[in-house]
Amino acid sequence: MAQAPATAPSSSNHDSGAPGGAHGHAGFWALLIGSIGVVYGDIGTSPLYALRECLRIVTGDFATAPTRDEVIGVVSLIFWALILVVTIKSVFLLLRFDNKGEGGTLSLMALVRRAFEKPSWILLGLGMLGAALFYADAMITPAISVISAVEGLRSVPGLGHHISPWILVISLIILVALFAVQSHGTARIGALFGPITLVWFLVMAALGAIHLSDDLAILAALSPVPALMFFVDHAGLSFIVLGAVFLAVTGAEALYADMGHFGRKPISRAWIFVVLPCLTLNYLGQGALALSHPEAIDNLFFMLAPDWARLPVVLLGMVATIIASQAVITGAYSITQQAIQLGILPRMEIRRTSETQAGQIYMPQVTWIMLAGVVILALAFGSSSRLASAYGIAVSGEMIVSTVLVFFGIWKVWKRPLWLAALICTPFVLIEIAFFSSNLLKVWTGGFVPIVLAIGLVVIMWTWVRGTRILGEIVRRDEPLSSLFETLSHHPPHRVRGTAIFLTGDRETAPAALMHNLKHNQVLHEQIIILTVQTLPIPRAKEGERLLIEDYLPDVKRVTLKFGFMETPNVVKALTEARKQGLKFDIMKTSFFLSRRTIVPSEKSGMPLWQDHLFIFLARNATNATDFFHIPSGRAVELGNQVMV
């Protein structure tokens, strides 16, 4: 899952870019080319290693040459995986689930949950699992992509022997540099994403096409028969090979995740008319080369290029893998922002790197956690072949989650019969379970890494959701707002000039900061605003529904600000806009009062003690509300109290 670069045209309509629409033909082509760079950057680097790893398994680590039927059968498996998993499921089915123009696992989860009368904890759990699996995949993708491209230097005549000891060092330098520049935003590099990746796909297609004549028998791979025969002839081995075949479709999850940035039609047409044909030609060319020159199977992709073009192709491959890695990094920012707004993760610092594109953000904590994970994985595995053992489990698991959510979506959102939803989704579930089961065979050779990462992240998310729910129940036991002001009407405190805005999560309960201000300062401002910020299960709040102002008492107003889960809650900006609707206050005479709770563990909280401590750790390290809601620090007052959870 990735974000659109800053230069990509933005659209609120998921079918944007259609001829005759708001963007017209020029806008459509800009969206299509932009989607090639961001959406397909990951799947576009799979030819570097996918077929090679399949043949590595078939030949026993290249101990023998593969037979003709084996080569054609494996290429057929890859081609039909692209057709079934990407074309039919992702392009023709998944892209039709539109949550107000947005896509992605969490967006789909929010869309489906809204269709149920009561909040479903099962669906929430599926959303958390899908997000956790994405994070696990996001740490492996940059490592395997960059290392596999740098390994191509070994195929450059006269360079291979000298460069081998430096492959890992060069890869680490590229990865560290990539993460280090994130704080500057991706606006400049984003302008090149689409065109460079388009060139990469066209070069891949050309390299494959010129080798088709090596052995035209490879065209038989376009039929499903060789794939089926491979299963019949290699009953045991074929199941293991599926884990490597799946490498060819990793990155398919980005199609749905980026729907909100580029639109359904540009993404789907880019796949059908550009990406799929180019990938198919390249895999067929690699297969033809393997048939005619079996000695080349240990570095098939780069051996497609003639000697004089090999270095330029390797360098272009490095750029393509950097783009693919960049897409995963910005995707991690996007899904983290959604998770925070949906209450699945604690608040983290979000910096905007573009004044014009809402999707352009930088998250320091996410960046450095991911960099640490990527570097550790690169050092621990050392090569793309070893990393391939850890790759696939997270993505195949995430695909199963999305299919289950699609099942509920067809049933509840589209309101189709239960049997029809099952009929549509069962084939995809069976295919993805086969891929997932095959990838589980890699557990002891590295596959445990994404599993451990995903489990750890699910525990963190579940702890945060559970802890905040318990904390909310404790807060609701505080004095009701109506009771407080009834008491104050009989015993009015001293009033001072200005406006006081008290932030609270429960609009019916007296804010803790208000209670402490009365207790310790024994004053009340002449104008009181009880402010609640709500996150809606839709990407962006409608302008007419973003603000609710209630006259609670003559000098007390209750204000509710509503934001979508793809928006950054800028409270001051929203309140300034509220002046147009009659909310009168002078920001220079306004103070924001926030409650800061010190949480201490309790054996009666309802959570195990270890989970109490984990929740407290997460709460202490969360970004404070002043920064998260963009409240000027000079106008904020934080009053604390102790709460047992």
Image (cartoon, helix red, strand yellow):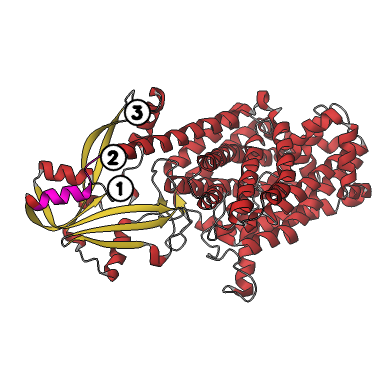
Badge 3 vs badge 2, beta-carbon distance below 8 Å? no
Residue type at numbered disc 3: Ser
Residue 228, percent from left and from top: 87, 40
User: Is residue 361 a member of the stretch shown in magenta?
Assistant: no
In which quadrant will I find the C terminus? top left
Residue 605: mark in rendering: 3
Secondary structure, mark 3, is loop
Side of 294 where 200 appears, left or right: left
Q: Which numbered disc, 2 or 1, marks the residue that appears first in the sequence?
A: 2
Compared across the picture, whether 388 is left or right of 216 comes to: left
Magenta segment boundaries in residue numbering: 478-489
Q: What amino acid type should be assigned to the residue bearing mark 2?
A: Val
Q: Position of residue 465 (x, y in %)?
A: 43, 38
Q: Mark 2 and mark 1: span between their CA atoms?
A: 8 Å
Question: Which residue is painted at 71% across and 27% down in the image?
Answer: 441
Mark earlier in primary sequence (3, 2):
2
Residue under circle 2?
475
Q: Is residue 395 left or right of residue 518?
A: right
Residue 404 sits above or below residue 265 on the image: above
Tag 2–tag 1 contact (CB < 8 Å): yes
Element on which disc 2 rests: helix
Mark 1 neighbour class, 10 Å CA radius: few under 14, some 14 to 19, many 20 or more: some
Is the residue 27 above or below the residue 230 in the image?
A: below
Q: Residue at horizontal 14%, vertical 45%? A: 517
